[in-house]
Image (cartoon, rainbow, N blue to C red):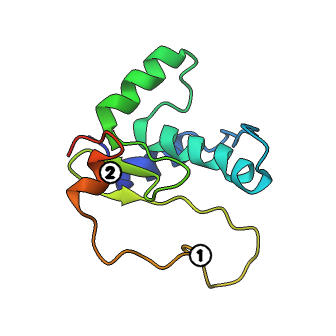
Amino acid sequence: MSNILRAFINIVNNYQANVSTLTNGNNRANNMGDGLEEFVKDIFAGTINETNEQNRLAAFSQIYSYSGNKNNPPDLILKNSDAIEIKKIESHSTAIALNSSYPKAKLFPEHFVENNVNI
């Protein structure tokens, strides 16, 4: 099981790790945050230095109950734990825009059933 404290420990222990630049598709806004999203996934799963993709994916399946998609928040849900929404900002302002659409007041099981999520 993972949590925010273990994620911080992984960041401290791997402070020299770099966020990759990924380009999947032709949506520049989505591409800008993909590398950060993969970095955060690795931080929580403890797979920052994992070079074998099969081992990395196996670790993800042990840690996450949901790995998100481009159209439905959150980005990650830790098994029996927290949901994580990853946002990349480049300004030094204090306000963070969490979403451009109206937030959902509640999450219902059918939101996850549509996306093949085990809850």
Answer left or right for 79 relative to 37: left
Q: Amino acid at mark 2?
A: Asn
Which amino acid type is shown beneath numbered disc 1?
Ser
Quarter holding the N terminus is top left
Residue 67 horizontal/vertical position (percent)? 42, 42
Q: Is residue 101 above or below residue 69?
A: below
Instruction: Give how far apart the Cα atoms at labels 2 and 1 are.
Output: 27 Å
The secondary structure type at the circle numbered 1 is loop
Residue visible at 54% across and 58% down in the picture: 86
Which residue does the numbered mark 2 point to in the structure image?
A: 3
In terms of secondary structure, where does tag 2 sit? loop
| Residue 44 figure quarter | top left
> Local crowd at mark 1 within 10 Å, few (<14), some, or many (≥20)?
few
Q: Quadrant of residue 93?
A: bottom right
Locate residue 58, reporting x and y percent: 38, 22
Q: Which residue is mark 1?
A: 100
The residue that appears at 73% across and 47% down in the rendered structure is: 31
Q: Residues within 10 Å of mark 2 (few under 14, many from 20)?
A: some
| Quadrant in the rendering for residue 115 | top left
| Residues at marks 2 and 1 touching, judged by CB atoms closer than 8 Å | no
Nearest-to-viewer mark from 2 and 1: 1
Q: Residue at x 25, y 54 (%)?
A: 110
Q: Nearer the viewer, residue 107 or 4?
A: 107
- Residue 49 vs 51, above or below: the answer is below
Q: Position of residue 33 (x, y in %)?
A: 67, 52
Q: Residue at x 74, y 52 (%)?
A: 32
